[in-house]
Image (spheres, rainbow, N blue to C red):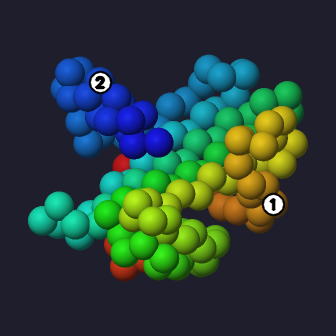
């Protein structure tokens, strides 16, 4: 999980895009597409988390993906995940201090590794929306 995060971070640094997120329009099935990301950290190499959201229209349906990765938390801790002040679920920290959540529109889940169905009333997120993971909070960019 964090190897992927490191690879993405390395690629972003090489391209000079570290810390950036974007909202894309067009492409991906003929409709608008949104991608936003929020990074959160406690500082001093302590707990940190990243939340990503993506949506696009695919085959006439809105496909939403929301995922959270958290690391360096106390093993066994429960982290409540909220978007714009509304709780969307909880994740539990494993023995390595890591926790994750992956939500996706049910119609597009075709493999158990694709995540858990996202609520049908999950909001479409944009730049400026907020997320919290346990005690950490951030803003989507």
**Residue drawn 37% across the image and 49% down it:** 141
Q: In this view, does 46 lie above or below 55?
A: below
Q: Residue 120 carries which label?
A: 1
**Residue drawn 26% across the image and 42% down it:** 19
Q: Is residue 60 above or below residue 93?
A: above
> Image quadrant of residue 26?
top right
> Image quadrant of residue 55?
top right
Left or right? Give the position of 49 relative to 31.
left
Left or right? Give the position of 20 relative to 117.
left
Q: Nearer the viewer, residue 29 or 5?
A: 5
- Residue 60: % across, % down: 86, 33
Left or right? Give the position of 84 relative to 40.
right
**Residue that sits furthest to the left in the current view:** 44
- Residue 37: % across, % down: 42, 48
Left or right? Give the position of 49 relative to 123.
left
Q: Is mark 2 on a helix, strand or loop?
A: helix
**Residue that sits furthest to the front in the current view:** 95
Q: Is mark 1 on a helix, strand or loop?
A: loop
> Image quadrant of residue 17?
top left
Q: Name the residue under label 2.
A: 11
Q: In whole angstroms, how far apart are the C-alphas of marks 1 and 2?
A: 34 Å
- Residue 73: % across, % down: 36, 70
């Amino acid at each position: 999980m964090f190897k992927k995060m490191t690879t993405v971070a390395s690629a972003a640094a090489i391209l000079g895009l570290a810390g950036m997120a974007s909202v894309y329009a067009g492409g991906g099935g003929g409709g608008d597409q949104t991608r936003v990301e929020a990074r959160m950290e406690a500082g001093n190499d302590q707990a940190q988390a990243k939340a990503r959201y993506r949506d696009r229209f695919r085959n006439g349906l809105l496909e939403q993906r929301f995922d959270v990765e958290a690391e360096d938390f106390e093993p066994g801790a429960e982290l409540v995940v909220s978007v714009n002040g509304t709780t969307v679920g909880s994740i539990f920290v494993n023995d390595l201090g890591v926790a994750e959540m992956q939500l996706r529109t049910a119609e597009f889940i075709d493999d158990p590794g694709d995540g858990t169905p996202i609520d049908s009333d999950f909001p479409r997120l944009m730049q400026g929306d907020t997320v919290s993971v346990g005690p950490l909070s951030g803003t989507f960019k």
